[in-house]
Amino acid sequence: MKCAEILLLLLCLEVVRFSAFASPPSTCPADLGKECSGSGSDEWEGEFFPGIPTIKYEGPSSKNHLAFKWYNAEEEILGKKMKDWLRFSVAFWHTFRGSGADPFGAPTKFWPWEDGTNSLAMAKRRMRANFEFIEKLGVGFWCFHDKDIAPDGKTIEETNANLDEVVALAKELQGSKFQLLWGTAQLFLHPRYMHGAATSSEVGVYAYAAAQVKKALEVTHYLGGQNYVFWGGREGYQTLLNTDMERELNHLARFFEAAVAYKKKIGFKGTLLIEPKPQEPTKHQYDWDAATAANFLRKYGLVGEFKLNIECNHATLSGHSCHHELETARINGLLGNVDANTGDPQIGWDTDQFLTDIGEATLVMLSVVRNGGIAPGGFNFDAKLRRESTDVEDLFIAHITGMDTMARGLRNVAKLIEDGSLPDLVRKRYESFDTEIGALIEAGKADFELLEKKALEWGEPKVASGKQELAEMIFQSAL
Ligand code: XLS
Ligand code: NI
Ligand code: NI
């Protein structure tokens, strides 16, 4: 391979990693600190989405692709309005910065309001488009990374000033109608973060990341954010041969402690969330899965300060189901938010597709209902259009299907609860523990001598069928 070809290949590989975070055909990529100029004005004539009506609920028989068939925001299910169970949120980075680029191809999305720049004017225009979008879609929440919404300046001060300008507009557009589900700092695109941010081997990078998170916490607080997310984009390693894992994990914990202290200092009441992911972009990320993150929080005495943001696609990458990750978080009192997306069974990476599998959505909602809901968390659509989907209306269709799928999941859980045979089956499996000796075991009062006495008395125990197929039959009949 010639040198130029190798360079091109490397560049392409970069594009896939950041495709969700890069701007559409831009001469000035986000976060590279270049000076960018756009058309100079954030004005936009008329609507961003002309011809798209406010999306309404029309019921399962509707053939209108711009209507909800299952999601009826005000309808009460299991004692709560659907909108309060689901608390849907649009992810700014996918919906407004997703370019459609992949390792082998350039961006494909050229939204009419984009002018091809990463200017401040463009950032403001995009923010206006965001609020028109969520209003028409009937979603109450949005999420962002600092770098999605405002261009970098030449210095930290200039970057912060740009962010302040866009955030002031966002606050105005939010009004009292919309809420920020969560904010986060993007600590993975810029080359300075190539070894990680809080786990970088360079102290200057650690400090830079701290300055960035400090600012992101401030603007999240200013926007009334209900949560703040830490996804450790490059907090991990490529090889242990050059890595002091113990030292890096200690640094990560110190970083989180400092974030907790600063949150308290500024009076931010939102929940801090860690979003586990096993790998990609690094070979091994420290927040591998829910159990690993829970263990980390316990080791460093951070339980009580953090919860988890479970992303379904990350769950499958870690070799678990989303249901497993949600249950692990739930039983540890750590279920905070869901990044509602899914992967592809044949592609082993974070494809960030909208979740459209009704069975999967029902399993997700089983955990959420058992948890009594996830407020102040919600369902953030960390999902993007396929590269080949290039119509503006595709943005609506994707979200509508994602929302309808979760709504069907919720409706199915209500059916399962009403029917009662699945919880009954589970309860029956454990009923031998409802006995006197079972209660002693569960209370931690049955020692080995007592249990040996019982075993001698009872002899060979009878073991009942697990009834898996029956459980599957009951589950499936609710779909
Ligand atoms: C990437 C993550 C990211 C976080 C926010 O895989 O899902 O999008 O949700 O930084
Ligand atoms: Ni995510
Ligand atoms: Ni992800």
Image (tube, grey):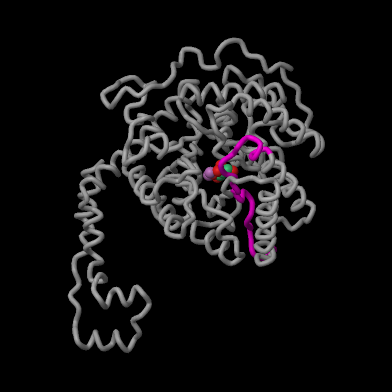
Location of residue 74 by image quarter: top left
On screen, 285 above or below 123? below
Instruction: Point out residue 419 in the picture as x, y percentages from the top left corner.
Output: 20, 47
* For residue 121, side relative to residue 114 (left or right): right
On screen, 359 above or below 116? below
Q: Report the number of numbered marks.
A: 0
* For residue 360, side relative to residue 139 (left or right): left
Q: Is residue 224 magenta?
A: yes
Nearest the camera: 272 or 14? 272
Q: Residue furthest top?
A: 45
Residue shown at the point (68%, 18%) measured from the top left: 42
Q: Quadrant of the N terminus?
A: top right
Instruction: Point out residue 457 in the picture as x, y percentages from the top left corner.
Output: 19, 87
Instruction: Point out residue 439 in the picture as x, y percentages from the top left corner.
Output: 30, 73
Residue range corresponding to the magenta coloring = 219-243
Residue shown at the point (45%, 41%) measured from the top left: 340
Nearest the camera: 94 or 391? 94
Q: Quadrant of the C terminus?
A: top left
On screen, 123 above or below 465? above
* For residue 65, side relative to residue 333 (left or right): left
Nearest the camera: 292 or 433? 433
Residue 116 shows in the view: yes
Residue shown at the point (59%, 39%) measured from the top left: 225
Residue shown at the point (70%, 21%) measured from the top left: 121
Residue 1 shows in the view: no
Location of residue 13 by image quarter: top right
Instruction: Point out residue 70 in the picture as x, y percentages from the top left corner.
Output: 32, 30
Q: Is residue 418 magenta?
A: no
